[in-house]
């Protein structure tokens, strides 16, 4: 059983990918329990304690800040997940199917709200969520469409989480919760020395499928398809 952040990283590198929360969703999760179940388990790994070595909630940012071989974002079933550098190109091949953002938008498979957001993010090196909202002048009534578009862009692997930023007021003082920082998928991996190769989507899908069945032989095909294709 995973005892700390180091164990988690080694387990993830071995598995290749994992759901991010405490629910395997019928596929696979390195930490398969959430905070409501953890007290019944004999483990030092517990959610929302704030301990960077044993709190899985902290690990989602630690992998981005301290490692160069793991991505974290809303990747599976519209919720969070991890993918290692070795497996990311295969998911990328399936999700993007060789299309650029412009090609996907012209084909009508990307929403207009996602286009507005993507143009802001792609014009920056990295940008925090609150800055995206400010630069885009998104109104309160845009919130639902904005949230859906952010998930859409992450699931389609056009953007990804790359860290966090402390908000500051007009006096330069820290306030509130940290804001999640985003960048394009290509920029994220270029900074980590990886140029995403053009792989065959069907072959990539099958390789991921076989790995899922190694991790969870009981996984159902309908869940496997959703997990891989987004």
Image (spheres, helix red, strand yellow):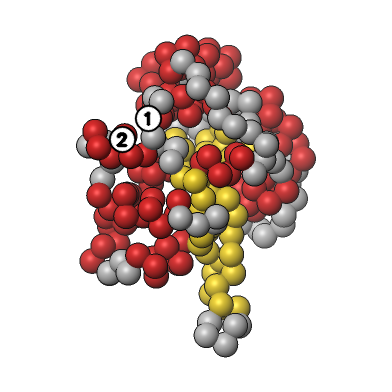
Residue 212, percent from left and from top: 53, 19
The answer to whether 141 appears left or right of 14 in the picture is: left
The reply to whether residue 11 is in sight is yes
Residue 52, percent from left and from top: 72, 54
Residues at badges 2 and 1 in contact (C-beta under 8 Å)?
yes
The answer to whether 65 appears left or right of 200 in the picture is: right
Most foreground residue, 177 or 173: 173
Q: How many marks?
A: 2
Residue 33, percent from left and from top: 56, 40
Q: Which residue is mark 1?
A: 99
The numbered mark, 2 or 1, whose residue comes first in the sequence reads: 1
Q: Residue at x 53, y 82 (%)?
A: 169
Is the residue 230 above or below the residue 52 in the image? above
Please state, as top left, top right, bottom left or bottom right, where the N terminus lies in the image: top right
The answer to whether 137 appears left or right of 72 in the picture is: left
Is the residue 73 above or below the residue 93 in the image? below
Is the residue 111 above or below the residue 164 in the image? above
Q: Residue at x 59, y 32 (%)?
A: 195
Which circle marks residue 104 in the picture?
2
Please state, as top left, top right, bottom left or bottom right, where the C terminus lies in the image: top left
The reply to whether residue 17 is in sight is no
Residue 93, percent from left and from top: 46, 24
Most foreground residue, 158 or 54: 158
> Circle 1: is it few (<14), some (14-19), or many (20+) Cα within 10 Å?
few
Q: Residue furthest bottom?
A: 171
Is the residue 186 above or below the residue 215 in the image? below
Where residue 98 sits, quadrant-wise, is top left
Element type at mark 1? loop
Whole-Å distance between the Cαs marked 2 and 1? Answer: 6 Å
Q: Residue at x 56, y 44 (%)?
A: 187
């Amino acid at each position: 059983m995973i005892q700390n952040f180091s164990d988690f990283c080694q387990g993830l590198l071995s598995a290749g990918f994992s759901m991010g929360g405490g629910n395997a969703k019928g596929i696979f999760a390195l930490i398969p329990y959430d905070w409501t179940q953890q007290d019944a388990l004999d483990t030092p790994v517990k959610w929302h304690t704030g301990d960077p070595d044993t709190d899985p909630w902290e690990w989602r940012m630690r992998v981005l800040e301290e490692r160069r071989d793991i991505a974290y974002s809303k990747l599976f079933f519209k919720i969070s997940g991890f993918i290692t550098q070795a497996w990311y190109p295969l998911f990328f091949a399936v999700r993007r199917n060789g299309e650029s953002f412009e090609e996907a938008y012209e084909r009508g498979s990307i929403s207009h709200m996602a286009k507005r957001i993507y143009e802001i993010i792609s014009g920056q090196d990295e940008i925090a969520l609150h800055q995206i909202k400010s630069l885009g002048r998104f109104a309160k009534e845009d919130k639902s469409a904005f949230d859906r578009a952010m998930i859409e862009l992450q699931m389609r692997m056009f953007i990804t989480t790359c860290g966090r930023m402390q908000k500051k007021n007009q006096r330069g003082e820290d306030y509130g919760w940290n804001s999640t920082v985003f960048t394009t998928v290509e920029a994220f991996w270029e900074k980590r020395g990886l140029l995403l190769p053009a792989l065959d989507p069907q072959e990539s899908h099958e390789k991921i499928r076989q790995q899922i069945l190694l991790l969870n032989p009981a996984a159902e095909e309908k869940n496997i398809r959703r997990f891989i294709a987004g």
